[in-house]
Image (cartoon, rainbow, N blue to C red):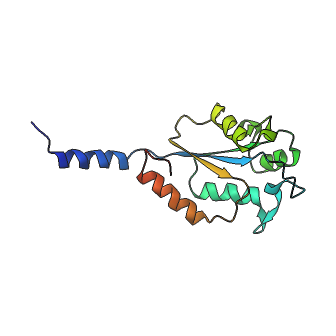
Amino acid sequence: MRISTSRTTKTKNRVLNEAPFAFGVVILAAGASTRMGTCKLLLPWDGKTILTHLLDQWRIAGAAQIAPVIDPSNQPLRKALAYAGFSPSDWIENESPQLGMFSSLQEASRWTGWLSTLTHWIISLGDQPHIETSTLCVLLNAARENPTRIC
């Protein structure tokens, strides 16, 4: 028996649309914040810290896992993460943050703590809290609709 091309395409699309979608978020937070004079993620934003704001946004958006990349010598950020319910096994330490943002991405790509059920990863800058949660959700929907593409 032969299946028509239109039916095969329809079946393929349905399978893609029903594919699991579980994303992890890398929050790039290892910068020295030298121009600010203090850790940017601990600055106030809308009644909380930028860190708390970002964590809340990604939780609302449905992140299966959130892993900030931090400079291990940043004790105030470590304390803030612990207060937010993170243990040291939940964050990624970049021992060489002075090498720049790409070194944090490399650490995130090597990290063995990622959930095996993740299908997508988001790279989020720690110093852009002004991006609306609704915008993040639009991007996530685009990723769901285009599971084999970078969005």
Q: Residue furthest bottom?
A: 46
Looking at the image, residue 115 lies above or below residue 21? above
Quarter of the image for residue 26 reads top right
Q: Residue at x 47, y 52 (%)?
A: 143
Q: Going 79% across and 55% down the picture, which residue do you hit?
A: 41
* Direction front: furthest residue: 99
x then y, percent, for residue 113: 65, 33
Residue 126 x, y percent position in the rendering = 72, 53
Horizontally, is 118 left or right of 93 in the view? left
Of 146 and 78, the residue lying toward us: 146
Q: Is residue 7 left or right of residue 86?
A: left
**Residue 146, percent across and down?**
42, 50
In terms of image quadrants, where is residue 20?
top left
Q: In the rendering, at what x and y percent does residue 38 appear?
A: 88, 55
Q: Work out which quarter of the rendered image holds the N terminus and state it.
A: top left
Q: What residue occupies the far left of the structure in this picture?
A: 1
Identify the residue at horizontal 70%, vertical 60% (top origin): 128
* Rendered position, 131 above or below 91: below
